[in-house]
Amino acid sequence: MIQDIFPYKLNNQFVQNVLPSENDKVMIFDQGKVMVHLEAKSVTFPTVKNASDSGIASDRLIYLFSISLEEGNKESYFLYQKTDVQISGFDFTDLRPIRDTEIDFMYKVMAMMTAKHLFDWYRDTKFCGRCGCKTVHSKTERAMVCSDENCGYTMYPRIMPAVIVGVINGDQILLTKYRKGYANNALIAGFTEIGETLEETVAREVMEETGLKVKNIRYYKSQPWGLANDILTGFYCDVDGDTKIRMDKNELKEAAFVKREDIILQPTKVSLTNEMMMRFKNGEEC
């Protein structure tokens, strides 16, 4: 999956006063696109030197995280928040095609998606949501703090919980296709609402999208998903009673129980959804 980058390791803890070096990476986003150089199955991010040569001062860069590589080496990643910039050899490219391509190193996709998550948060917290004043960066933690001393409201990175659900009916699993957006096979999915447990989210989303009741809800695995600022939690469950599907046509264009041998997996192995479908297809414990 996207986070399985071993032997590399994401170091996402807050570090104060990190100074960029010439070879560190600069992440720049604009309306769902990221600045990269693409060549075949290789993706390259601009370096601090590339950015400096294009007039971007290093003191305008925000430290995001580092990734530990082999032999004690590491790459640090920085964010540049403005979009009106051109860097020779690099272009803004949609994130989804990069995600859906088997590129040379999966850690680069993980870095891109994690950086996108933080970019969204920094973009959305320039002003205090409580009093409307401008915010400043905390000096002790990853947070944005209201500049008004009488308010002082502190905002932390937002992570939205969501569920991915494999609904099992004997030797079949429920596969869906979304009405809009992603075109390949998927599982039931949805966000957790206020006051709701993850297990309650599973039962509600399955009922809302297919009209099915479920039982034996069991946790499988979780996955960060920076494209939508999510933490995805995967569950399997069994149909409880009637197996007739009453599909929500506003959300889905297809929903059907499919036998193991007939399951068509997603084109890449980056998603929790695909791993859950693959486990069932291979007859593994679900």
Image (cartoon, helix red, strand yellow):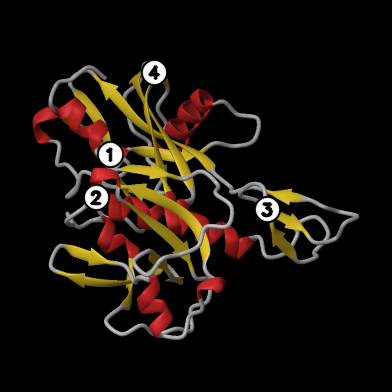
Say if mark 2 contacts mark 3, CB within 8 Å.
Answer: no
The span from disc 4 to disc 3 (Cα, nearest Å) is 41 Å
Badge 1 crowding class, 10 Å Cα cut-off, few under 14, some 14 to 19, many 20 or more, is few
Residue furthest top as drawn: 216
Q: Residue at x 59, y 49 (%)?
A: 157
Mark earlier in primary sequence (3, 1) = 1
Residue at the spot of label 3: 139
Residue at the spot of label 1: 4
Residue at the spot of label 4: 218
Q: Nearer the viewer, mark 4 or mark 1?
A: 1
Secondary structure under tag 4 reads: strand
The answer to whether residue 138 is visible is: yes
Say if mark 4 contacts mark 1, CB within 8 Å.
Answer: no
Q: Residue at x 36, y 83 (%)?
A: 87
The amino acid at mark 1 is Asp
The span from disc 1 to disc 2 (Cα, nearest Å) is 8 Å
Task: Report x, y in % for residue 208.
Answer: 47, 36
Residue at the spot of label 2: 106
Say if mark 1 contacts mark 2, CB within 8 Å.
Answer: yes
Task: Report x, y in % for residue 274.
Answer: 24, 39
Q: Residue at x 50, y 62 (%)?
A: 19
Quadrant of res 8: top left
Quadrant of res 98: bottom left
The answer to whether residue 179 is visible is: no
The span from disc 3 to disc 1 (Cα, nearest Å) is 31 Å
